[in-house]
Image (tube, helix red, strand yellow):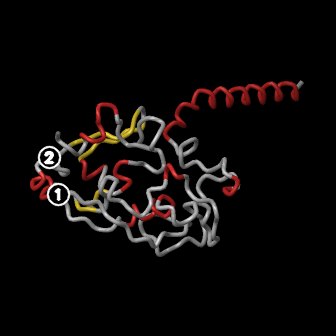
Amino acid sequence: MILSVMEKLAGLVLKGCVLLLAVTLPSWAGTIAGSAHDFTGSAWSGGRICVACHTPHKSDTSVTDAPLWNHSNSTQSYTLYSSATLNATMGQPGGISKLCMSCHDGTVAVDSFGGTTGSTMISARNNLGSTLNDDHPIGFNYNTALATADGSLHDPSTKMIAIGSGSQTKSGTIAAVMLYNNKLECSSCHDVHNTFTVGTTGLLKVSQAGSQICLACHNK
C-alpha cells in the first residue's frame, strides 16, 4: 500500500516536471542553445556548446576581453573601412572584435581550440576576410565629439535605445548598451550569446525592420 502511494506520488512529480518543461520551453529563445553559435550539431564539438570559445580550466589568460577563453586567436591585420565622409579615426578592431574575427576572418579554423589546430573553416557566407573596407566600420571611438563633427549621428551619451525582445530586453544609452570601452565593435550590433537579440538570424540586438538597427545610431 505504501509503495503504491509512493509510486503514484513519483508519477505525479514526473508529470509535473514534464508540464513545467513544456511551459518554460519558449523562454529558451533568448539563449545560445539553438542559435547560430550552438555548435552541438558539429562533430568536432563533442556535443558541447561552449567549448569552442570557453573552457573551465587552462584558459588563455592573455585574453582579457572574454572570460576563460579557449579558442586560437587570429594574428591578422585588416584593411580598414574608409570613406570621404568618414569623421571617425579608424583603428584595428578592438579586443572583443578580434575574438569574433578569430573565426570570422577565415584564417583560423573554427575547431581550433583547447590547444589543438583544427581544419574546419567558417562558411564562405560568414567569412568576412581580412579586407573590412566593404563592411560597417568597427574599432573606432564613438563619442559626443564624433557625433557633433559628423552631424548625422546621435550623441551616444544621451540617445536612449532598447536591445533584445520579449522578456529579455535592456534599455540605456548607446554608450551603455552598445559600446565597448567607448568603441563601436562587432558586439555593438550582434549578441554572440543570443541573450538580447531580435529575430532568428544574425544575432542582432535591434530589429532590421524599418532600418531600426541603423537608426539606433544614425539620425537620418
Decide which of tag 2 and tag 1 comes sooner along the chain: 1
The reply to whether dot 2 and dot 1 touch (C-beta < 8 Å) is: no
Q: Residue 105 versus residue 31: which sits nearer the camera?
A: 105
Q: Is residue 126 left or right of 138 when viewed as pictured?
A: right
Give SS at disc 1.
Answer: loop
Q: Quadrant of the C terminus?
A: top left
- Residue 16, horizontal then vertical, whole percent: 68, 27
- Residue at 9% in and 53% down: 148
Give the spatial CA distance, label 2 vs label 1.
15 Å
Q: Residue 201 versus residue 161: which sits nearer the camera?
A: 201
Q: Is residue 191 left or right of 173 when viewed as pictured?
A: right
- Residue at 29% in and 36% down: 212
- Residue 80, horizontal then vertical, whole percent: 31, 63
Which amino acid type is marked by label 1? Answer: Ala
- Residue at 88% in and 29% down: 3
Give SS at disc 2.
Answer: loop
Q: Residue 69 versus residue 202: which sits nearer the camera?
A: 202
Q: Which of the numbered marks, if any, corresponds to residue 84?
A: 1
User: Dot 2 corresponds to which residue?
Assistant: 152
Residue farthest to the bottom, as pictured: 62
Bin the neighbour count of mark 2 within 10 Å (Cα to Cα): few under 14, some 14-19, many 20 and up: few
Which amino acid type is marked by label 2? Answer: Ser
- Residue 133, horizontal then vertical, whole percent: 32, 58
Q: Nearer the viewer, mark 2 or mark 1?
A: 1
Q: Quadrant of the N terminus?
A: top right
- Residue at 44% in and 60% down: 129
Q: Quadrant of residue 213?
A: top left
Q: Is residue 8 above or below residue 30?
A: above
Q: Is residue 52 left or right of 85 when viewed as pictured?
A: right
Q: Residue 19 versus residue 71: which sits nearer the camera?
A: 71
Q: Quadrant of residue 210?
A: top left
